[in-house]
Image: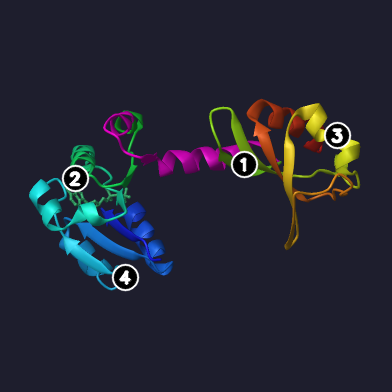
Amino acid sequence: MKKEFAVIGLGRFGGSICKELALQGMDVLAIDIDEEKINEFSEIATHAVIADTTDETVMKNLGIRNFEHVIVAIGDNIQASILTTLILKELGVKRITVKAQNDHHEKVLNKIGADQVVHPERDMGIRIVTSLVSNNVLDYLELSDEYSIVELIASSKIDGKTLIELDIRAIYGVNIVAIKRGESIIVSPQADEKICKDDILVVIGAYQDINRLEKKLLNNE
Ligand code: ADP
């Protein structure tokens, strides 16, 4: 079943969301106040319309409430982003994702009931710094304030050791849910699986436990 999306604001972020949705075969309505943007996306999106989304009547006429998921990617104009979100909420759109420009903006969006608030520049910044400051962390996914899934590179310290020998779950309280080795991936590895240097370990657990594991076992120094 194709899902119906609407993307409001076709800047760098909204534009790439719109392109990716179209590539994945979804129906996308692209909306922007700027005619040039609409011309640019008319061939990419299923429909592209020029509209000021802070105008409730315009939004009603577009039938925006029938879309399953609306993404608000109005960047600099915070007022327009908030007003648009409020209108979408009032019209009863089921799922609204909004790009926040800063922490205050994010707070307001959460208060008025945006289902998902994203902060791509900040989040990508944190992601990049995390992998820059640690030699072992490749990537991570925040599950909550406490827990995350992290990809760590196995060091020579644990080369050739099995999971049972390392006893990671008992000692560190974290679980290795997968091991990536070159092109292959071992999901839910068995206790007798041997780790090789440069394997990528996909670890789930509390931040502090993963941190301990990284410092003790994975640091090459
Ligand atoms: P980014 O930082 O992701 O590049 P921009 O701020 O450059 O975001 O782009 C936001 C887009 O939102 C612009 O194309 C702009 O024309 C559009 N936009 C701004 N206000 C409105 C509005 N009231 N209704 C519809 N589109 C809007």
Furthest-front residue in this view: 1
Q: Amino acid at mark 4?
A: Ile
Residue tagged 2: 91
Check if mark 1's residue and mark 4's residue have beta carbons within 8 Å.
Answer: no
Q: Secondary structure at mark 3?
A: loop
Residue 124 on the magenta segment: yes
Which residue corresponds to mark 3? 167
| Element on which disc 1 rests | helix
Residue type at numbered disc 2: Leu
First along the sequence among labels 3 and 2: 2
Residue 49, x across and y down, in percent: 18, 63
| Spatial CA span between label 2 and label 4 | 27 Å
The amino acid type, in three-letter code, at marker 3 is: Asp
Mark 1 or 3, closer to the camera:
3
The question of residue 73 being in magenta is answered with no
Vertically, is 95 above or below 10? Answer: above
Tell whether label 3 touches label 4 (CB within 8 Å). Answer: no
Cα gap from disc 3 to disc 2, whole angstroms: 54 Å
Residue at 16% across, 55% down = 33
Q: Residues within 10 Å of mark 3 (few under 14, many from 20)?
A: some
Quadrant position of the N terminus in the picture:
bottom left
Q: Residues within 10 Å of mark 2 (few under 14, many from 20)?
A: some
Give yes or no for contact between labels 3 and 2 (Cβ–Cβ under 8 Å).
no
Residue range highlighted in magenta? 107-135
* 73 lies above or below 103: below
3D distance between C-alphas at marks 1 and 3: 26 Å
Instruction: Give whichever of discs 1 and 2 has the lower sequence position.
Output: 2
